[in-house]
Amino acid sequence: MNAANAMNHVRIVEVGPRDGLQNEKQRISTETKLALIRKLAAAGLKDIEATSFVSPKWVPQMADHAEVMAGLPSGAEFPGVNYPVLTPNLKGFEAAVAAGAKEVAVFAAASEAFSRKNINCSIAESIARFEPILAAAQAAGVRVRGYISCVVGCPYEGAIAPQAVAEVAWRLRDLGCHEVSLGDTIGIGNPASVARMLEAVAARVPMAQLAGHYHDTYGLGTANVHASYQMGVRVFDSSVAGLGGCPYARGATGNVATEDIVWLLHGLGATTGVDLDALVDCGAWISAKLGRESGSRVARALLARRG
Ligand code: HMG
Ligand code: MG
């Protein structure tokens, strides 16, 4: 890939099997989760967040994390695909590594109230909890991504100051996270507020190490991806069919749909390596399994066009 192409390449982190399913009330079988992961890999996604090593009391849907890891496709079947998992503490990290994880993600928040609701500790305590994870990960050759929730607004505290996000991003980067994913957990951001937040964060952490993780609650997920892309962000998290929601953010809907951002990014001349037709089929399949319409407008339009 030459330098000009590299500038236009966007890495999509597909979070459907984790963020997309974690809040589902109906029980989803491990077999269905693994079939979803296979279809996503077959559609060309190279980073597929597979599950969470969190407490099953807190998030019952992710309780089969070890079984999901055991059933992941082999490297020979889908070369170059990463399957990161969420790990909130050392216990989760150790279980994830024992299950074969090569990449994990720690998750903090820019809001104290959300931090307490989501992981039962303050922001400072969460950073202290991540320190041994980063040390153990380094020793084991495991990559660690950092997440920040509530980067624009919080369901409990309201608007969040961009500087508060920048401070947590810097701490995660300083701990050794290779990338910091900026989560608009409740989808309250718009291109102006997301740009203000990004500007503040990029002053502390290089843009090349930032990812946009936008939920689509108010329908501005793709607009926020566009604004971030124009500012230089080249990594975005999204969920096939727009699945999802956070169990600790009432009313927050799914992530921006992967089909929608692939359509947008290809339209802007960016490459993603994703086969949109195969992705639309995958989104239709999981939506049918869950008994609901896809949250992706692009997928619905493309399916209607197929007749
Ligand atoms: P706690 O209750 O404070 O934990 O929960 P504890 O250390 O006091 O332990 C209590 C019990 O949990 C003990 O078991 C531990 O062994 C067990 P007991 O003795 O009672 O039988 N435990 C665990 N079990 C399995 N895996 C573990 C683990 N740790 C302790 N890793 C904890 C603290 C962090 C564990 C809990 O709050 C938790 O699991 N939270 C996860 C919440 C979550 O998954 N939220 C959704 C993901 S984040 C998100 O969606 C946002 C994101 O998408 C970005 C965005 O959009 O903003 C990433
Ligand atoms: Mg999320």
Image (tube, rainbow, N blue to C red):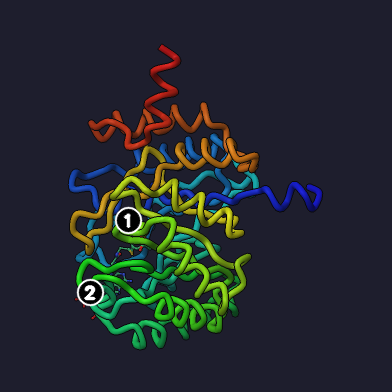
Residue 258 position, x and y percent, is: 45, 42
Mark 1 secondary-structure assignment: loop
User: How many residues crowd around disc 1 within 10 Å: few (fewer than 14), some, or many (20 or more)?
Assistant: many
* Residue kind at label 1, given as amino acid type: Gly
**Front in this rendered view, residue 83 or 164:** 164
Residue 67 position, x and y percent, is: 37, 52
For the C terminus, which image quadrant?
Answer: top left
At 42% across and 75% down in the image, what residue appears?
162
Mark 2 secondary-structure assignment: loop
Q: For marks 2 and 1, give the CA distance.
A: 15 Å
Q: Residue furthest top?
A: 307
Residue marked by disc 1: 187
Seen in the picture, residue 14 relative to 119 is either above or below; the reply is above
Disc sitting over residue 105 in the figure? none
Residue 226 position, x and y percent, is: 51, 49
Residue marked by disc 2: 157
Residue 4 position, x and y percent, is: 77, 49
At 20% across and 71% down in the image, what residue appears?
156
Q: Quadrant of ligand 1?
A: bottom left
**Front in this rendered view, residue 164 or 254:** 164
- Residue 98 visible in the picture: no
Q: Residue furthest right?
A: 2
At 43% across and 52% down in the image, what residue appears?
50
